[in-house]
Structures are given as C-alpha cells and as structure tokens.
Amino acid sequence: MGFNFQHNTSLKAFNTFGLDVKTAVFCEVDNLQTLKQALSETDQTQMMFLGGGSNVLFCNDYNGLVIHNNIKGKQIIAETDNDIILKAYSGEIWHDLVMYCVDQGWGGIENMSLIPGTLGAAPMQNIGAYGVELEQVFVELEALNLQTFELETFNREQCQFAYRESVFKRQLKGKYFIYSVSIKLSKQPKINVAYGDILTVLNSKGIDPSNATIKDVSDAVIAIRSEKLPDPKVLGNSGSFFKNPTVTVEQFNALQSQYPTIKGFPQANGVKIPAAWLIEQAGWKGKQVGQTGSHAKQALVIVNYGHATGPEIYQHALNVIESVYAQFGVKLEPEVNLIQSVSNS
Ligand code: EPU
C-alpha cells in the first residue's frame, strides 16, 4: 500500500514567516514506523523535514517532499533526589515542554521560554536565549540514520555544539532525522538571571532575585520576548534572522575607535558583536521595504507585513548583509535555514 502523500500543498501554515509557498509533495508523520515508510517511498535527494517552521525561509516553491514532524510524547527516564532526565520526542513544541517543566518545578530551560519551534530543531542549532543554551541541559539524542534506517545515539560531545551550531548543521547535514532528545533538569533549581534584562523585569515587579523561582524567570523572559519579538501569528517572522558575528580583537578595537558606542562580548575566538546594533546603525531598524523590512523593536528580526514573497525577504536579507559589510567590514550570516529549491524543469 502506498503512503498517503499530498501534492502541490501550501506551506503557509507551516512556516512562521507565513509565506504562501507550495511544496510538490507533503506528508505528516506521527511515529517512527510511518516516517520510515514515507522515507522508503521517496527520493531522498529532494526532501526536507519541517518542525515548527520557525527557522526557515522558503526562497521559492519547494520542488520535493516536505515531511512534517508530529512525533510527540515524553517520559522520565532517570530520577534522583536532585535531578531528572526527561526524554521527549522531536515533534513536541519546545515552549510547551518548557511550560510543562516549569510547572513541575524542574529547572534548567526556563530562560528559553517562548522560543518557537519543535524540540527536534533545538539541538540542530543549539538554541539559546537569556544566558542559557540547550547544550547546558543536553544529555543525548536519538537520530534516525537516513541511509540505514537505524536509530543512533549521540552524546553531547558527538553533537559538536557551538553558538547556534551542531554537527547536524555541518558534517551530518541531511543525513539524520532527530527522533528524541533527553535533557537533565534540576529538582532544586538555581536560577540564572545573569542576563541584565531579566533582572530589570524582576526588579520592576518587586521580586528579589535571590528569592525568584523558575516560574518568575520564565514569566520575565516571556515578558521581554513578547515586548521585543513580534508574534508570528500577527507579523510573520522567524526570530533572529542573522547570527551575532564574532570578529577578531584587532577588528573590534578598530571598530570601537570609530564607533565608541559599539558593544562587544569577549569570546574564546574573538569578540561577539550584536548584529542588531550593526543593522540599526546601517539604518535598517524599522524600515519597511515593500512587504518586508527589519523590525522596529529588534533589528535582528525580518518581518513579513502580510504579502511578502520568499524572494522579496531573501533580497532584503542580502541588502542588509551588503550594507552592514560596506559600513563595518563585518559579514553577517543568516541564522535561519535558507531553502532554495532547484527546479526539475
Ligand atoms: N541591539 C541594538 N538594536 C536592536 C536590538 C538590540 O542595538 O534593535 C543591541 C543592544 O545593544 C542589545 C544587544 O543588541 O544590548 C543584544 O540584544 P538582545 O538582548 O535583544 O539580544 P540579541 O543578541 O539581539 C540574541 C539571540 C536571541 C535571544 C536573545 C536573548 C541570536 C542571533 N539571537 O539576540 O535569539 O532571544 O539574544 O538571549 O543570538 C533567535 O535566535 O531567534 C533569538 C530570538
């Protein structure tokens, strides 16, 4: 019996930019067996997985198969007086999982509240926000090898996490499907309020940071994100469009002497600069170009004002990259995955 594929399907509801792009073939999977069946009946050279669609820009229609991951479920696989290890399946909505853990009193991921997307995408790009990255709670993941159809386990080291990076975006790109992720959470959580904005919100609510709970931190992060980042249901977007670039210390010093207000965060390999600052200085913040533009409250976010097309947003991103490079000599790299489908015809 053949698999239930849909043809010429709109992806509007499956990408947070809200782009009305089409995929030649579409299917949804909610368990491993169905996924293997779909894979066995398709040409894997023209295929992609889609979770929450919150980190992709479809530059044009997709000329292949889009597999929407709806594999859900979670279970505790180990527990001590101090910690639990929670294993969850990759189609779980990340924010729902964060809320579940906060409700249970399990700490570790509350700073990453309200990040859109699915759990499966989290290790792919080592999601992070407000001073915490996934790798800090990560234990292991199971991924389906797309050649052998066997599940393989990857520990933290094997995932090669870095800032918005993992082996699954690099050497193993397109070779695995992330099936489950296990994270370690604390039953006696210590909160992390090192990121200045969180302290500001706690203070404004009269909450003493030394008594703050993970729920307080989660609420503060939700308040900050809701203020700065547009709700994709209202204004299509994919969060930060670019990564924050790291430049050499020499380059940073040269920039600082020319632009004294520039911020820099020292890293092992140089100085990280807020891309939003560069974009703002280059004059893009709040600037609308046709149906797209750079968001007025957070310049790192590119938005769809309603009827933008993939090529239009892509062109805007290229224009931003070009003008930031012309002014500062710093090359911005997209954080979102650019899907540029090659036509068969
Ligand atoms: N800034 C500007 N102009 C702006 C916005 C920010 O100059 O329009 C400057 C400010 O100086 C600010 C600095 O940039 O101090 C940092 O801004 P913010 O705290 O908003 O963080 P970000 O570096 O712009 C990163 C992540 C976000 C994450 C926040 C909070 C990346 C690419 N983005 O943004 O992640 O929520 O930190 O931790 O690392 C995402 O990945 O989609 C995302 C939203």
Image (cartoon, rainbow, N blue to C red):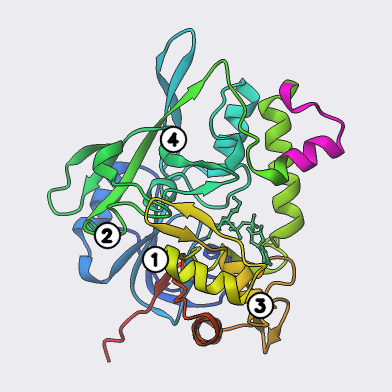
Crowding at mark 2 (Cα within 10 Å: few <14, some 14-19, many 20+): few
Q: What residue is shown at x 19% (from left), y 53% (from top)?
A: 146
Q: Which residues are magenta?
A: 199-210
Label 2 or label 4, whichever comes before in sequence order:
4
Quarter residue 85 falls in: top left
Label 2 or label 1, whichever comes before in sequence order:
1
> What is the number of the mark on residue 170?
2
The residue tagged 3 is 281
Quarter residue 91 falls in: top left
Label 3, label 1: how many angstroms apart (C-alpha)? 41 Å
Label 2 or label 3, whichever comes before in sequence order:
2
Q: Quadrant of ligand 1?
A: bottom right
Q: Disc 2 or disc 4, which is closer to the eye? A: 4
Q: What residue is shown at x 63% (from left), y 82% (from top)?
A: 282
Q: Horizontal placement of 288 versus 251: left or right?
A: right
> What is the number of the mark on residue 136?
4
* Foreground residue among 28 and 157: 157
Q: Horizontal placement of 102 versus 154: left or right?
A: right
Q: Horizontal placement of 276 versus 61: left or right?
A: right
Label 2, label 3: how many angstroms apart (C-alpha)? 31 Å
Classify mark 1: helix, strand or loop: strand
Q: Does ligand 1 reach within 8 Å of label 4's beta carbon?
A: no
Label 2, label 1: how many angstroms apart (C-alpha)? 25 Å
Q: Could you tell me what secondary structure mostly forms the magenta stretch?
A: helix
Q: Disc 1 or disc 4, which is closer to the eye? A: 4
Residue sitting farthest toward the top? 81
